[in-house]
Image (cartoon, grey):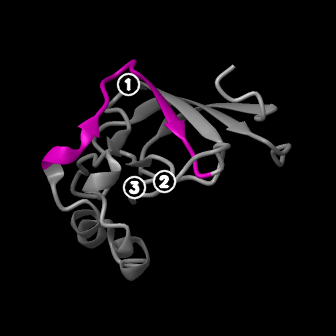
């Protein structure tokens, strides 16, 4: 109902160990809903907290370097809780002005071998205007 132009839903349940979306970004899809059933939820920031010029300037650098350059004020990060439903408008949302919501997977501590100390059980529901690849 929020976006009748989006005619395709893709649902995915996954166990996330090492973060695949550990860098601040906006997505090119229409929208996404996420729920973290275990572990920390998605991190989000308002546009005024983002240094958009740093997306390209820090490409290829480790997240420990790029994260504070893209979002300098760590206190501005909205950290969602377990079982919170997060609705994210992507850059392809019809009529959007500017960019979609800037977000990332939360920073999860690692053990001495580099493995995450907590895994996340996630539900992702993506909304798109084109048929997703299988």
- Give percent across and percent down for residue 95: 64, 44
**Element class at badge 3:** loop
Dividing the picture into quadrants, the one containing residue 120 is: top left
Tell me if mark 3 has few (under 14), some (14-19) or many (20+) residues whose alpha carbon lies within 10 angstroms of its own.
Answer: some
State the residue in front, 97 or 83. Answer: 97
Residue linked to disc 2: 20
- Give percent across and percent down for residue 85: 45, 22
Is 28 on the left or on the right of 79, as rendered?
Answer: right
Up-down: is 21 above or below 119? below
**Image quarter (top left, top right, bottom left or bottom right) of the N terminus:** top right
Cα distance between the residues tagged 1 and 3: 17 Å
Is 42 on the left or on the right of 129, as rendered?
Answer: left
Q: Residue at x 85, y 43 (%)?
A: 131
Tell me if mark 2 has few (under 14), some (14-19) or many (20+) residues whose alpha carbon lies within 10 angstroms of its own.
Answer: few
Where residue 38 is drawn, which disc sits there? 1
- Give percent across and percent down for residue 16: 47, 40
Residue linked to disc 3: 22
Magenta stretch: includes residue 88: yes
Is 129 on the left or on the right of 104, as rendered?
Answer: right
Q: Residue at x 58, y 36 (%)?
A: 32
**Element class at badge 2:** loop
- Give percent across and percent down for residue 45: 31, 46
State the residue in front, 52 or 74. Answer: 52
Tell me if mark 1 has few (under 14), some (14-19) or many (20+) residues whose alpha carbon lies within 10 angstroms of its own.
Answer: some
Q: Residue at x 50, y 55 (%)?
A: 98
**Element class at badge 1:** strand
Magenta stretch: includes residue 83: yes
Looking at the image, is mark 1 or mark 3 earlier in the sequence? Answer: 3
**Image quarter (top left, top right, bottom left or bottom right) of the C terminus:** top right
Cα distance between the residues tagged 3 and 2: 6 Å
Q: Please state the extent of the stretch shown in magenta in the rendering.
A: 75-91
């Amino acid at each position: 109902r929020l976006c009748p132009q989006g005619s395709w839903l893709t649902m995915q349940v996954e166990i996330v160990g090492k973060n695949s979306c550990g860098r601040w970004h906006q997505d090119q899809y229409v929208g996404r809903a996420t729920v973290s059933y275990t572990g920390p939820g998605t991190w989000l920031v308002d546009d005024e907290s983002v240094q958009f010029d740093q997306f390209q300037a820090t490409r290829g650098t480790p997240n420990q370097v790029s994260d504070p350059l893209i979002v300098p004020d760590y206190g501005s990060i909205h950290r969602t809780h377990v079982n919170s439903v997060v609705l994210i408008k992507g850059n392809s949302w019809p009529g959007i002005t500017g960019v979609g919501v800037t977000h990332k997977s939360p920073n999860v501590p690692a053990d001495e071998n580099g493995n995450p100390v907590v895994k996340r059980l996630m539900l992702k529901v993506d909304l798109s205007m084109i048929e997703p690849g299988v």
